[in-house]
Amino acid sequence: MAKRRLIKNSSRKSQRTPEPHRVSADEASLFREAFADIKPLNFDQIDPQIAKTKPVARFRIEDEKNVLAESLQGHIDETELNSGDYLRFQRHSVSRQVFRKLARGGYSVQAETDLHGLTAVQALELLGTFMHDCQRRSYTCVRIIHGKGLGSGPNGPVLKRKLDSWLRKMKHVLAFSSATQVDGGTGAVYVLLRKP
């Protein structure tokens, strides 16, 4: 029992708090000399230097992105649509949904040819060769660039009108529609072809 009490007593002594260090007059004098040049601050709290960021109009940016996407995927410019420059044709067997998808550029274009700048005779020959090749390869959607006929004079776009007539007479043409703005607008047509 005596040993236990001794151990307990010795542990109590080690748990006592040490006495504070007494500063001598020499130490106080040295401390004052070392910090003699220092000036006290006028305030007791320092604000961190935070770089201010400019406010970002999240919704405006998102709206602009949506408008751009709509303009690229949109059907056609209203001024072109109202001017009568828009080409469209569909056989009775083609549903409205299929034609709408074609007009919006929803089908993958498998081939294209460019007729603008050619004479009517040259264009008809190239068109015949192109369409025959597309049929042989079993293509279902192609794009034909005919131009807007801006240099055709007062009679309007000659090649465009002829292409409209030629495509309607081809039995393997199911439908055609002026392209979206990104693919040439009223200067080109998407053509949906019958599978052989």
Image: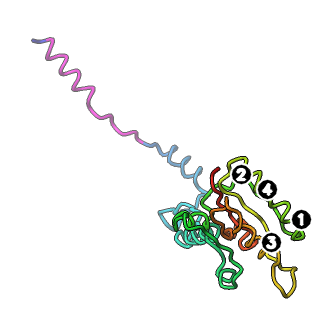
Residue 75, numbered label: none
Q: Which residue is mark 3?
A: 147
Above or below, 32 relative to 4 = below
Which residue sits at x=65%, y=85%?
82
Q: Amino acid at mark 1?
A: Gln
* Distance between mark 1 and mark 3 Cα atoms: 15 Å
Residue stretch in magenta: 3-22
Cα separation, mark 3 vs mark 4, equals 17 Å
Q: Nearer the viewer, mark 1 or mark 3?
A: 1
**Farthest bottom residue in view:** 154
Q: Which residue is disc 1 drawn over?
A: 122
Total marks in image: 4
Q: Earlier in the sequence, mark 3 or mark 4?
A: 4
Q: Earlier in the sequence, mark 1 or mark 3?
A: 1
Mark 2–mark 4 Cα distance, whole angstroms, equals: 9 Å
Which residue in the structure is indicated by mark 4?
130
The answer to whether mark 2 and mark 1 are in CB contact below 8 A is: no
